Amino acid sequence: MLSERSESTYAFKASAFSSHTLLVNALPALGDGRRLLDVGCAGGYLSAIFAQRGYQVVGLERPSGAGDAFPAHIELVEADLEQGLPRFEPAFQYVICADILEHLRDPKKLLRQTWAVLEPDGRLVASLPNSGHWYFRLNVLFGRFPQEDKGLFDRTHVRFYMWAGWVELLQSGGFCVESVVPTGTPVGLALPSLEGTWLVNVLERVSYGLARMWKTLFAYQFIVVARPEALS
């Protein structure tokens, strides 16, 4: 079964440069009834935002993983993602994989099943951690591989990819990357006592600028929009 995840760790991050904000902004502002599947939806923090924007949202989470506060107006389906996606009809215009593929033993299998539940002109939108980030590289260089509660060294991650590895994985799952937006380092999460201060805001803006210039080294995560292609 997919590793258990803490609700306190997996909550909406409202920074202008956070992966959640950039992921939400990757979709049309108005859903107009389009069907959207939120894979690994946790407590429904992203599902609720998309529902408010007019999407017809289905949340998918491991049994008992959504908690008691999951939005009552959103359909919730419980399933072990390691065992595969349930059958869905009709198909979806969007599938969201926010901070999920790195937790799976076989993300390629999930991607191929995602391909099958998408409309031919649908889109996969995913947030993917960057194991090529300078902080990750520096730790490995000095012989360290921390086990942390969140971030690039999250103890529940079982897959570690740099940008080229993610592109290859997506292609093997039947997807072609259409666009990518890098995120900067979430300084506010690293320094919670200073979150919201001018210093953190400036540092996050600088970090985001560096990520835009050199994503393979400075991107903390990649926000990817990918279209389905013919499976080989």
Image: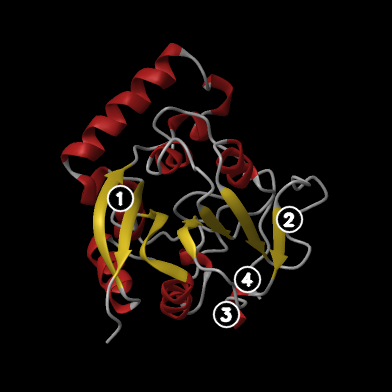
Q: Residue at x 79, y 45 (%)?
A: 69
Q: Earlier in the sequence, mark 4 or mark 3?
A: 4
In three-dimensional space, the C-alpha distance between marks 4 and 1, rounded to whole angstroms, equals 25 Å
Is label 3 in a helix, a strand or a loop? loop
Residue situated in front as seen by the camera: 110 or 90: 90
Amino acid under label 3?
Gly
Nearer the camera: disc 4 or disc 1: 4
Residue 78 position within the rendered picture, expressed as x and y whole percent measured from the top left? 72, 68
Is 77 positioned to the left or the right of 211 in the image? right
Residue that badge 1 annotates:
133
Residue 46 position within the rendered picture, expressed as x and y whole percent measured from the top left? 58, 44
Identify whether 95 is placed above or below 28. below
Q: Earlier in the sequence, mark 4 or mark 1?
A: 4
Residue 84, labelled with which disc?
3
Q: Earlier in the sequence, mark 1 or mark 2?
A: 2
Is 186 positioned to the left or the right of 175 in the image? right
Amino acid under label 1?
His
Q: Earlier in the sequence, mark 1 or mark 3?
A: 3
Q: Residues within 10 Å of mark 4 (few under 14, many from 20)?
A: some
In three-dimensional space, the C-alpha distance between marks 4 and 3, rounded to whole angstroms, equals 11 Å
In three-dimensional space, the C-alpha distance between marks 3 and 2, rounded to whole angstroms, equals 18 Å
In three-dimensional space, the C-alpha distance between marks 4 and 2, rounded to whole angstroms, equals 13 Å
Q: Residues within 10 Å of mark 1 (few under 14, many from 20)?
A: many
Is 179 positioned to the left or the right of 186 in the image? left
